[in-house]
Amino acid sequence: MEFLGDVLEWFTTADNWLGTTGILNRTWEHVQLSAIAVAVAGVIAVPAGVALGHVGRGGVAAVAVVNIGRAVPSFGIVALALPITIKLGLGLGFWPTFLALVALALPPMFTNSYTGVDEVDAALVEAGRGMGMRGPEILRQIELPAASPLILAAVRISSVQVVATATLGALVAWGGLGRFIIDGFARGDEVMVFAGGLLVALLAVLTELFFSLIERVILPRGLQIRRAGVETAVATSA
Amino acid sequence: MLAQIKDEPFIRWDWVGSHLDDIWSRTLEHIQLTVVAVAVGFVIAMALSLIALRWRRTYAPITWVSGVLYTIPSLALFALLVPWTGLTFLTAEIGLVGYTLLILIRNIVAGVDGISPEVREAAIGMGYTRARMLWEIELPLALPTIIAGLRIAAVTTVGLVTVTALITLGGLGSFILRGLQRFFTTEILVGVVMSVVLAVAIDLVLVGVEKALTPWARHKAGA
């Protein structure tokens, strides 16, 4: 109980909130880099997955990508990004973390975009053709809306994973909330470690809730899938 | 240090050759951490799934709690546990077991739910009791889905075990961590590659287990 008192004291000390090493700045760094990484990965993976799904090619790649993505530890991706960015002359800190997070976010977004478009009911596409729609119209008015639940689910899954792994950026000299945990371990300061753990856990749960809310708000009710189905759908096809 | 890594080749085979013993013992450590986590996770998940199947109303809270556990990043979870259970095997296992639960529970429940009602009716008609139906009909028929869950849980756990290097356990993760600290790419690569190899190997073992336990699936699928 005394320990929790120390944690409370840590959180009520103004110095721990302010400045470059404070909670506010560390949270901002964490959110900012995660958002950029998810956005960059989305710009690459979603169009690629949608295009391949539209032409119906690349199913093997879609399954392989998600399986390999699962087998490679995210800690390993962060660690391997470091020698790569150093060889490229980009150095420590931002770049290795950024590179690792993008690599991590690509597989689920690619695979879900592909699966979402590929698995659109053939009768719907057929009906579109019968109404005189061409390829691009079918894509925009039928396939993309029908695939949107899976694509949004991938954005949520990737975002949570990226926020989680951004914590490890502290190991390659980046900032973010992981600093409290890593620095706390280095100094043997368990209060700081615990506080850092609490902050990271909170941010991850909030990210999950935020994207679930977005899904609920922008998807028409008929398109909302039962959340439990998403990962298992990908999983069992693997 | 940075200049050194720039000139360093990505992998130095002489280092690998002179550390084979070390690599082997870390791999065994890694396997131990993984197997204990998945086995304990499976027992707990099975118990919770049976509760959820018997009393439907408990399913939502059970998946909610395991979902929150699943969402909390591994390093954060370890950070929350260390002040209470220290830098120990127990801390690592609590975290690792926590991550397997959501995947396993979801697949066990989905597997049992996916059984067609005719099968159940036939069993009831033959006088099966509820318990006997569960053990002799429902769980065997749900086996492919349950093993699919085990495969995902095992592969995920192999990856997560690397993170436990940060709380001084870690198996193969300790190569990754030490490689990072010394800017030594070879060691990082050894940790990552061996972890991937281990994940694939465990996955293949589970595929074999599934084949052995579901002989009827071979006749049906034919492919």
Image (cartoon, coloured by chain):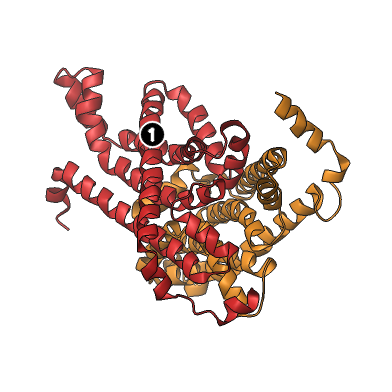
Residue at (31%, 52%) from the top-left corner?
B202
Horizontal side, residue A98 vs residue A145: left or right: right
Residue at image position (71%, 48%) is A180
Q: Amino acid at mark 1?
A: Val
In percent of width and height, residue A132 lies at: 47, 71
Query: Mark 1 falls within which chain?
Result: B
Q: Position of residue B103 (x, y in %)?
A: 42, 41
Q: Where residue A216 appears, x then y in whole percent?
A: 61, 44
In the displayed structure, does residue B116 sit left or right of residue B94?
left
Q: Please tell me whether residue B74 is drawn above or below residue A29 in the rendered image.
A: above
Q: Colour of chain A?
A: orange
Residue at the farthest bottom position: B7
Residue B209, given in percent of the width and then of the height, sits at 22, 46
Identify which residue, A104 or B89, lies in the foreground.
B89
Residue under label 1, please give it. Answer: B40
Tell me the quarter of the picture where residue A47 sits: bottom right
Dividing the picture into quadrants, the one containing residue A212 is: top right
Could you tell me which secondary element the residue under label 1 belongs to?
A: helix
The hue of chain B in the figure is red
Q: Can residue A123 be seen?
A: no
Q: Quadrant of the N terminus of chain A?
A: top right
